[in-house]
């Protein structure tokens, strides 16, 4: 029999564990600060409601209904190729050929090949890309950053992180980012260790591995966040950080803020890569999916807000200025903590907190491919985990060597540039990141929402969502027709009320979500500028 979650909270913590990651801790606070603070928080919440929540529900419904991997989930309509999938395939081929004519050889070839594969395999293609390809690519570089956090955590507790300003911090960071000199072995070691531990958890199974560890680690993460927030807020001068992070400044909101909020809501909820879908396939029919999804949203948003409260007050209180991305959490913040008595302890706790966040996310990335290998290729779970682990760790090692630049892989770089016909990002890491997150993720999310909205059908999906809840749904008119609920005659005794959540959701999944995701995709790949 298929394994199921042991408890409702076990499931919620597992999904939240995947959702709460580096995106919440280093990215959210920063983009929030740069985009008008509290104003951005509001915008983000709107995006979560417009895009994140409908897709979260869609993935969960598909997973539970299919009780199978991402590939099997796209067979909910029994056959993989439909007129609709042929249409998408043909469209891709046409776009690909146009790109080739416009001399975009790399993208042109990629899109044409994707179109042909789509024509041959139908919807299953999307299942394979979102459940195997994307997670494997992301584990590679996410694992390296996870490795860094382990290294920093160790260094803090050993009192080796004792620089007093960001310049000193940069001197520590550089050899780590480049995995060079004395730091090569520790960086590789930590990356491999981090990824192996994740694989080990996955190896122990859904309930004994993922659920058990999520139930321990997630509460611990929140406790650490609270301790750090209290420390930060009680420092003199903390209010400047609070002001930077939270005071709403609507004049700083731009079209780009909207796109950033939208992209982030997608990445932060781990959508589009089969994780939520796969986790949903371990749900029993009695679970109330809607309630659990709300809990996940709340936990994810709360973690992001709390991270900001833990970071900015400390940074501003110590007189530093905020800076972006990795530099903020690996350089500016540790330097700030070092000015507080017992700085090593605060740094240690901070990096432990990030390590936990990254760990539960990384561990969730192993599950979708493992599930595909088990369900579709009939492998034993343990062999599947071993196979996925070997591929991911190998990729992780390659990524660790190319985080800062291409210099170690100049042959590969030249080859790719030749094939691609265009310039490439400054490192393999960035190429992989942009390929997975800017291209594949939104495209898979887009197609998934079309599949649920128009292919598999909102009516079936809503029926799945309603199992385990007592909401009422019903018959109707144009509005219902749009939302996909036209022929619900004979649909048991529950009636659809015009303004039920299900109807609203149907409307979103069919129209709003795919359009918004597609616009954000066009922006991410640079096709439209705002
Ligand atoms: N949701 C995670 C975060 O916020 C990101 C993530 C992406 C996790 C992909 C797992 C897989 O950082």
Image (tube, rainbow, N blue to C red):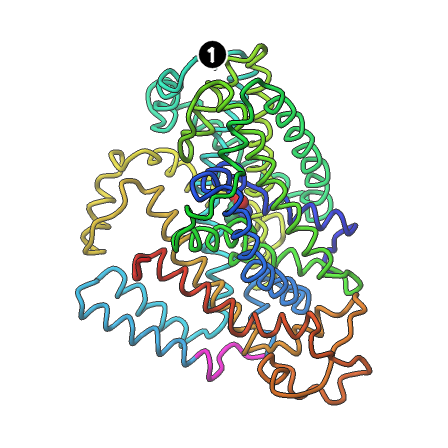
Specify few, some or many for label 1: CA neighbours under 10 Å numbering under 14, 14-19, or 20 or more: some
Q: What residue is drawn where x is 59% and y is 68%?
A: 73
Residue range (magenta): 78-85
Under tag 1, what secondary structure?
loop
| Residue 434 vertical position relative to residue 360 in the rendered view, above or below | below
Front in this rendered view, residue 422 or 408: 422
Rendering coords of residue 346 (x, y %): 58, 19
The part of the image, by quadrant, that contains residue 111 is bottom left
In the image, residue 198 lies in the stretch drawn in magenta: no
Circle 1 is placed at which residue position? 162
Residue 388 visible in the current orientation: no
Tell which of 277 and 469 is nearer to you. 469
At x 53%, y 23%, the residue is 314
Coordinates of residue 18 in the picture (x, y in percent): 59, 46
For the stretch drawn in magenta, what is the main secondary structure? Answer: loop
Q: Nearer the viewer, residue 140 or 1?
A: 140
The quarter of the picture where residue 176 lies is top left
Nearer to the camera, 18 or 311: 311
**Residue 208, percent across and down?**
73, 43
Quarter of the rendering occupied by the N terminus? bottom right
Quadrant placement of the C terminus:
bottom left
Q: Is residue 358 left or right of residue 517?
A: right
Is 528 on the left or on the right of 130, as rendered?
left
81 inside magenta stretch: yes
Is residue 488 shown above or below 420? below
- Residue at image position (38%, 76%) is 89
């Amino acid at each position: 029999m298929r394994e199921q979650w042991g408890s409702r909270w076990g499931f919620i913590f597992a999904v939240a564990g995947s959702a709460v990651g580096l995106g919440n801790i280093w990215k959210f606070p920063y983009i929030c600060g740069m985009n008008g603070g509290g104003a951005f928080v509001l915008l983000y919440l709107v995006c979560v409601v417009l895009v994140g929540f409908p897709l979260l529900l869609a993935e969960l419904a598909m997973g539970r209904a299919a009780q199978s991997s991402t590939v099997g989930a796209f067979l909910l309509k029994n056959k993989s190729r439909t007129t609709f999938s042929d249409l998408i395939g043909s469209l891709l081929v046409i776009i690909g050929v146009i790109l080739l004519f416009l001399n975009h050889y790399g993208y042109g070839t990629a899109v044409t090949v994707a179109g042909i594969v789509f024509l041959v395999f139908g919807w299953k293609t999307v299942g394979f890309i979102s459940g195997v390809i994307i997670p494997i690519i992301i584990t590679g570089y996410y694992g390296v950053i996870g490795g860094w956090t382990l290294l920093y955590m160790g260094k803090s507790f050993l009192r080796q992180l004792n620089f007093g300003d960001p310049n000193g911090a940069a001197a520590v960071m550089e050899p780590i980012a480049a995995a060079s000199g004395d730091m090569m072995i520790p960086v590789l070691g930590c990356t491999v260790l981090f990824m192996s531990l994740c694989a080990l958890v996955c190896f122990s199974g859904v309930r004994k591995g993922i659920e058990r560890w999520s139930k321990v680690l997630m509460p611990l993460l929140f406790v650490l966040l609270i301790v750090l927030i209290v420390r930060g807020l009680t420092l003199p001068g903390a209010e400047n950080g609070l002001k930077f992070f939270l005071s709403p400044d609507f004049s700083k909101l731009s079209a780009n803020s909207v796109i950033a909020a939208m992209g982030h809501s997608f990445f932060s909820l781990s959508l589009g890569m089969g994780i939520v879908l796969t986790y949903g396939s371990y749900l029993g029919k009695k679970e109330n999916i809607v309630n659990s999804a709300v809990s996940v949203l709340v936990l994810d948003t709360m973690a992001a807000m709390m991270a900001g409260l833990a970071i900015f007050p400390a940074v501003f209180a110590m007189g530093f200025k905020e800076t972006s991305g990795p530099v903020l959490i690996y350089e500016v913040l540790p330097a700030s903590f070092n000015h507080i008595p017992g700085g090593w302890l605060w740094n240690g706790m901070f990096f432990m907190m990030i390590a936990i966040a990254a760990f539960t996310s990384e561990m969730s990335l192993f599950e979708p491919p493992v599930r595909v290998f088990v369900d579709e290729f009939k492998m034993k779970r343990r062999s599947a985990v071993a196979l996925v682990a070997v591929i991911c760790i190998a990729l992780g090692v390659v990524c660790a060597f190319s985080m800062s630049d291409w210099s170690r892989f100049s042959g590969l770089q030249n080859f790719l540039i030749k094939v691609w016909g265009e310039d490439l990002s400054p490192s393999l890491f960035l190429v992989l990141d942009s390929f997975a997150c800017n291209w594949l993720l939104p495209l898979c999310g887009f197609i998934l929402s079309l599949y649920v909205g128009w292919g598999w059908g909102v009516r079936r999906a809503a029926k799945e969502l309603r199992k385990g809840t007592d909401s009422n749904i019903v018959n109707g008119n144009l509005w219902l027709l749009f939302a996909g609920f036209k022929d619900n005659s004979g649909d048991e005794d529950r009636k659809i009320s015009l303004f039920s959540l299900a109807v609203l959701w149907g409307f979103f999944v069919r129209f709003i979500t795919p359009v918004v995701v597609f616009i954000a995709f066009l922006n991410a790949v640079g096709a439209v500028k705002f």
